[in-house]
Amino acid sequence: MQTVDEFDVVVIGGGHNGLVAACYLALAGRRVCVLERLDELGGAAVSSYAFDGMDAKLSRYSYLVSLFPRAVIDQLGLDIRLRRRRYASYTPLPDADRGLLVDTEDQEATRASFAAVGADTDADAYARLASDLGRVATALWPTMTEPLPSRTEARRLLGDDDLWASLFERPIGELIEQRFESDVARGIVATDALIGTFASVHDPGLAQNICFLYHVIGGGTGDWDVPVGGMGAVTGELVRAAREAGVEFRTGAEVVSLTPEGSVEYRTRGAREGHGDETRRVKGGRLLANVAPVVLERLLAAGGSPIDREPGPSPSPMAATTPEGAQVKVNLLLSRLPRLRDPDVAPEAAFGGTFHINELLSQLEQGVRSAESGELPNPLPAEIYCHSLTDPSILSPELQEQGAQTLTVFGLHTPHRLGADAETLQRAVLDSLNSVLAEPIEPLLLTDAHGRPCIETKTTADLERTLGLPGGNIFHGPLSWPFVDDDAPLKTAAERWGVATRHPRILLCGSGSRRGGAVSGLGGHSAAMAVLADDLDR
């Protein structure tokens, strides 16, 4: 008879949220086991040598850090270094030799750049919005590591009913169009509402507003920082801390079913390949699901529990909904940065922040309409992040000396339903990028050890197949407000922390939790706090 190992807590999924939860609980004296389907821990927050023979370690999926609380880093003793970028963004105007550069260290230069693109009045509007969003971040960011506030409590913390209504009750498109006159300024603001979210800025469901909020409150400032060493350095530190705390890791372990009583069945790599080890079982006093809620439901169904067809509790409203991603990510390794059409902006400045490609508000809205009608947007709205300008350590000294740079292009409005293949999406991304440059990007691509161009494309299908993200949705499903309705049930610790499921022994601990999404660790932190609070109450 096979021995069933028992643990206080079994974490299903070794992504960054699962690692955060495991660290906290192991440090609190719990016996913790983490089961991970892949051979490597870290989930989407990993770095890898994407191109054969090239000493460049890229953040393959996720890339920037804003929502990871300093308190979590300090409490877990993590050596994670983040670097601030001077430039917020550069947005070249389509079919023109001008662009808008937002320099966070030079307000006058930023104001002059607004004037250069014919958006003089929007400079003041941009500064006023930044001030307003700073107040939102100051009010709500501290609540992210506390039990969930109610809607009324969150509104009281902000203390501005008009601003609350604009951000939390009406489509963000209204605020954008009321405050800004130019298409380019409107687009710069709108992109924060659409990264990873397929919606119009006027969507009455407000998914875009929720996405916008998470993009502007991180750290109490909304700044998006570069992790030194890449995203793999973040999860590498979490793995180190977890091992030192006594967490047991089982990689190559694909969970195939679980039960509300805490039994987990998983297949080892050998069993999946038709040889070697048999299917194994473990049991946990608590199960923390670092998987999408819809995946959790499938695992419960495989274990004999009926699928929940009714709307879930407020912390998990999408449990029975199949998510859909709507992005494409392209990584490039270049011999140098490309030249710009704008003679007044250096490439190092333009690519030093977020480089917007065909992201005027009119283009973003047209992109949604095109995708909804079954067509790939043309041109494809996208934006670029250059890790190596801020943190060259991801490149070997030789590549640094040669002037090599990495670019990550994140394309919007490519919903999974389109079924577009990687080659088609990659071509759309490159065509869109080339349309705003002074030279084509292709000749700048370095070649790997086999003579192939150093470019890789990750589609929603890739994320579903490789990382197990349903529909390639990077947030595990629709994002949720970081507060609950006033009449929401908050009887249990799991409900108060936004990680409840319909089974008391099972908690969400990933991006599908109430405050999940992005590389934040908040899902893992909330789940750990709920377990510890519940154990204390007992």
Image (tube, rainbow, N blue to C red):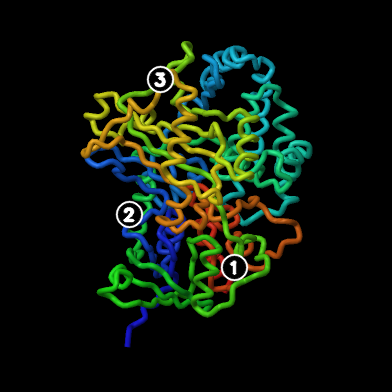
Using the image as rendered, state which of residue 111 and residue 93 is in the foreground.
93
Name the element at disc 2: helix
Residue 211, percent from left and from top: 61, 44
Alpha-carbon span between mark 2 and mark 3: 44 Å
Q: Position of residue 375 (x, y in %)?
A: 58, 42
Q: Position of residue 377 (x, y in %)?
A: 56, 37
Quarter of the image where one finds residue 426: top left
Number of callouts: 3
Left or right of 173 in this view: 382: left
Residue position marked by numbered label 3 in the rendering = 439
> Which residue has dot 1 on it?
501
Q: Is residue 255 above or below residue 117?
A: below
Going by the numbered disc 2, the residue's amino acid type is Arg
Depicted 432 relative to depicted 209: above or below: above
For the residues labelled 1 and 2, the Cα–Cα distance comes to: 30 Å
Q: Residue at x 42, y 57 (%)?
A: 465
Badge 2 is on which residue?
Answer: 240
Q: Are marks 1 and 2 in contact (CB under 8 Å)?
A: no
Residue at 54%, 73% (x, y): give it: 505
Residue 413 image position (x, y, % from top left): 57, 41
Please, what is the three-letter code of the amino acid marked with disc 1? Answer: Thr
Q: CA distance from mark 3 to mark 1?
A: 52 Å
Q: Quadrant of residue 161?
A: top right
> Is disc 1 placed on a helix, strand or loop?
loop
